Amino acid sequence: MISFKTYFESPLDEQKDYFNTATAPTLGYYSLDSYKRKTSKWGVELGFSKAGPATDTVLIDSDNNTEKRVYKQFQSINLQLSKGADFALTSRFYLTYGLQFTFRYVTYDYNIIKNNYVNEESILQFRAGGMPKAGLKFRVFKEMYIGLEAFYLLSINSAGEFGENTLNSYAGISPLLSVKF
């Protein structure tokens, strides 16, 4: 089965002060194994996240001075491994649930304006995390489905602006279109 999703991820931690909700178009491939009313699936997805800055300028107190930060766009390339199931509620409606493991290559830049000097910082992180999800999908045609999933993502990053091994959390929704082949 091939699926197309667009994740809408909102940060729940300190990143919510810096970045808006990210959109992440994602293409996936799933292997299916059906038995009666339940279809088990495992697969892989590849996507790209983008989020704009939450405000034009952020003021941060450090060392008894206030510095201004101007954030630029947040971007990541996402690879996700999935295990889940679809359970038939009726002949057209399905309950979906599962767990994804996500690996992300994250970049963003910001300028620090302090004492009339501008310093540009670039952040590069590798993140790994888990994402439980659940949702509903509807069979439109014989082998075509549309749906909506909700998820919670908890990830740990390699290093960066907020310190080493920082946990990041997101919540979101994902509309989907999938076609069985």
Image: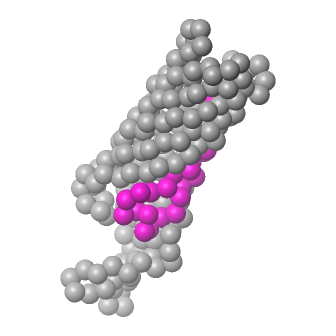
Q: Is residue 19 magenta?
A: yes
Q: Where is 53 relative to 82, above or below?
A: below
User: Left of 126 or right of it: where is 50?
Assistant: right
Q: Residue at x 55, y 12 (%)?
A: 33
Range of residues picked out in magenta? 1-26
| Residue 49 seen from this side | no
Q: Position of residue 59 (x, y in %)?
A: 38, 81
Q: Where is 27 relative to 143, above or below?
A: below
- The quadrant in which residue 103 appears is top left
| Residue 171 seen from this side | yes
| Residue 69 vs residue 153, the one in the foreground | 153
Q: Where is 74 relative to 31, above or below?
A: below
Q: Residue at x 31, y 64 (%)?
A: 161
Question: Which residue lies most toward the left here?
Answer: 63
Q: Residue at x 22, y 86 (%)?
A: 64
> Which quarter of the figure is the N terminus placed in?
top right
Question: Which residue lies most toward the front here?
Answer: 89
Question: Which residue lies most toward the top here?
Answer: 35
Q: Position of residue 65 (x, y in %)?
A: 26, 87
User: Left of 12 or right of it: where is 26?
Assistant: right
Q: Residue at x 47, y 49 (%)?
A: 171
- The quadrant in which residue 89 appears is top right
Q: Where is 15 relative to 2, above or below?
A: below
> Which quarter of the figure is the C terminus placed in?
top right
Q: Position of residue 104 (x, y in %)?
A: 42, 44
Q: Position of residue 177 (x, y in %)?
A: 68, 34
| Residue 50 vs residue 176, the one in the foreground | 176
The chosen color scheme is one colour
Question: Which residue lies most toward the right here?
Answer: 141
Q: Is residue 152 magenta?
A: no
- The quadrant in which residue 47 appears is top right
